[in-house]
Amino acid sequence: MQPTPDDSPNWFRQRLRQAPWRAQAQGTSLMLATVMIVAVIGALYLAQASRTAAAGRRLQALESQRQQLEQQNAQLRAEIAALRSVPRLTREAESLGYHPASPDEVEYLVVRGIAPPPEQGAIVAPAPSPPPAEEVAPAYDETLEGWLSEQFAGFRAQVVEFIRNTFGQEQASPTPVP
Amino acid sequence: MNEALRRRLQFVGALLAVLSGLIVYRLVALQFYVDTAYFAETALTEYRYRVTIRPPRGEIYDRHGVLLATNSVEYEIGLSPVLILDREGTAQKLADATGLPYEELLAAMSAPEPYVLLVRPAPAAMGQRVLALDLDGVVATPLTRRYYPHGSLASHALGFVNLDNQGFYGIEGFYNDVLAGRVGVEDQSRIPFEASPGEAWRNGSDLYLTLDTEIQYLAETTLRAALEEMGAVSGTILVMNPRTGEILAIASLPDYDPNRYFSTDPNLFVDPAVSEQYEPGSTLKVMTMAIALENGVVVPDSTYEDAGVLEVGGVEIHNWDNQAHGVTTMTDLLGKSLNVGAATLSLRLGPTRFYAGLDAFGMGQLTGIDLAGEGAGSVRRPGDANWFESDLATNAFGQGIAVTPLQLAVAFAAVANDGLLMQPHMVSQRVDADGTLTTFEPTVIGRAISAETAEELRAMLANALEREASAALLPGYRIAGKTGTAQIPIPGGYEPTATIGSFIGFGPLDDPQFLVLIKLDRPTSSEWGSQTAAPIFARLVSRLVVLLEIPPDGVRQAVASDH
């Protein structure tokens, strides 16, 4: 009959002597477990860093695109302004046979009872400038620890919810094992 | 055997453990103990870089929202030969996009330099075609530059901007900080890519001017035609609202194209209307008369004996025609532009009251207009080392005193505006990047004369013009104004023949809505302002009343009588 853990204080040594490969197996298992944990942590970090880098690249590409579109808009505004310049419009009008009116070519119609409109001040056109610069979003500074904490909190909330739904309100938290 | 193998494995394991321990020790030491500042800084410079963000410069509009200055994009197109794999294909595509010869492009791709510049500056359309091709080794770098769609129109008023986004002269110079906005600085990381908030950047503010593009164009074309017709070498036309101080047009020739400031004679950048001073000549008699009326020395019906010559401080004052005019009224003094009469008034006033009156009109002082490079003019006073008794007489008819065209216009506008001096200004509104609108209200900067004196003087000026059948008159509209013919000072005296002909006037008389100053330098068709500047005034005003939609006096008064 094999000695039991209660039989002898040297039970553990006895078992090792009988099966020394168990120590090696345990050591190897421990090492493998450590390596796997490190690998998982490394993989998680790498995944997060990759997402961050991808987001940053996307942001840069969008910034570049926005800048390009703003430059195109500015260029179009400049071209429109040149086409609408007074010297050019005057030349076009004169080529069509128009000439600047002199005072004796203008007829004023006095309509009794109607007051002339008040003098208009400077007219402010809709602001053609680009929209105000939006506030730069906070830096993407989530850490692995923060991300793990967030995942764990979410997982814990799901467990609590599951238990509440399965076992009812009075057993909202798991019963401790004696 | 097993024992030997076990010992070898133990030895190798121990060796590996020692090596690992050394590596871990070195890692920890580098991280925490060994010159961490150096490595930290080196790491930062390797993967972090600073980006300077230059926001777009604010745009400039006229009073009706017509765009006067904006930002356009040109490109610098270049290539890195070492990065181009398919030279023939790339050269062909580039040739189609840029119009450059295929062989030239192929040769550039064989150059030993790491970077070869192809075109700078390239038009926006060309740059965007090259960008759309997305060719390896070919870059099209955008270059933002200031663009003035109307060319040389209002060039003096606008100024220009250099490649460093720095404004010079005019509005660009005066409001440079407002238009430029705030440069932003951001720290960015390559590893991993990130965008972190740095110093906030702010777009430049847009400015809406008081200028009216149509009136500005009218002023410039009228001036250009006047220079040619009158044989003048240069000139200035200034149009303003005397009630508000708004500058509707400010034109000086010769001018320049601010799009090509880099190839322009720098002497042309200075705006003669606000920076260059000259002796105003007979136009200053209006101020002399105003001061005399204000101080009660004379009334509109007063007379004086014009003997044709007056001796003051050892200097003989003569009328322009060297004639004596006998008993002369104040209105005829203005109409006939008599130097003896003006000197008589200043002598009766005495230096204290006369120069105090000139101060009240802003002579010798900056107006404070929002344009870069304003000049203050020059007034010699009793007590100055170079003031003489004869100056009291000669200053009265605008000799020995220097003003800028703007100063004279602002002073004259006070006569139109019931004696109130208004702050001349070019900007009416400012729109910031966040949409905040700031309006600049008309501002009174002083009172030169009383409203009663101003009204009397307006009537005298109008009557004087009509009595002399001035060429400045416009049928249907009562105008008040004064001609001026000034000599040009040189060391030791004045030029014998060259003059500056000018006319300054406003209307309609009963409700002044515009003031126009015409100044022609060295006209050859005639030396007299009444024959050079006065007809130009009438020509310009005949179009101006149409642009400003000012009906003839009869129509306006009929409308006014109905309400």
Image (tube, grey):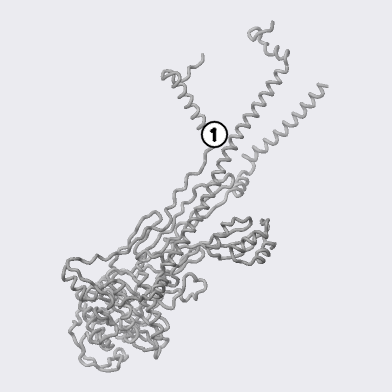
Q: Looking at the picture, does residue A61 appear above or below residue B461? A: above
The residue sitting at 67% across, 61% down in the picture is B109
Instruction: Work out which quarter of the rendered image holds the C terminus of chain B and state it.
Output: bottom left
Q: Chain of mark 1?
A: A
Q: Looking at the picture, does residue A167 appear above or below residue B218? A: above
User: Where is mark 1, residue-wise?
Assistant: A145
Q: Nearer the viewer, residue B539 or A56?
A: B539
**Residue located farthest toward the right when viewing the structure as drawn:** B1
Q: Nearer the viewer, residue B98 or B161?
A: B98
The residue sitting at 45% across, 24% down in the picture is A161
Amino acid type shown at disc 1? Glu
Instruction: Work out which quarter of the rendered image holds the N terminus of chain B and state it.
Output: top right
Q: Looking at the picture, does residue B280 appear above or below residue A131? A: below
Report if residue B359 is visible in the image: no
Question: Residue B265: where, in percent of width, then height?
Answer: 49, 76
Q: Is residue B288 left or right of residue A48?
A: left
Among the 4 quarters of the image, the one containing residue B319: bottom left
Question: Residue A118: where, in percent of width, then height?
Answer: 24, 65
Q: Nearer the viewer, residue B388 or B185?
A: B185
**Residue located farthest toward the top when viewing the structure as drawn:** A1
Looking at the rendered structure, the secondary structure element under dot 1 is helix
Among the 4 quarters of the image, the one containing residue B349: bottom left
Report if residue A138 is visible in the image: yes
Question: Residue B170: where, in percent of width, then height?
Answer: 41, 69
Count residues near mark 1 (Cα–Cα under 10 Å), then give few for <14, some for 14-19, many for 20+.
few
**Residue located farthest toward the front when viewing the structure as drawn:** A96
**Residue located farthest toward the left when viewing the structure as drawn:** B562
Among the 4 quarters of the image, the one containing residue B450: bottom left
The residue sitting at 33% across, 61% down in the picture is B439
Q: Is residue B378 left or right of residue B92?
A: left
Question: Residue A148: where, in percent of width, then height?
Answer: 53, 32
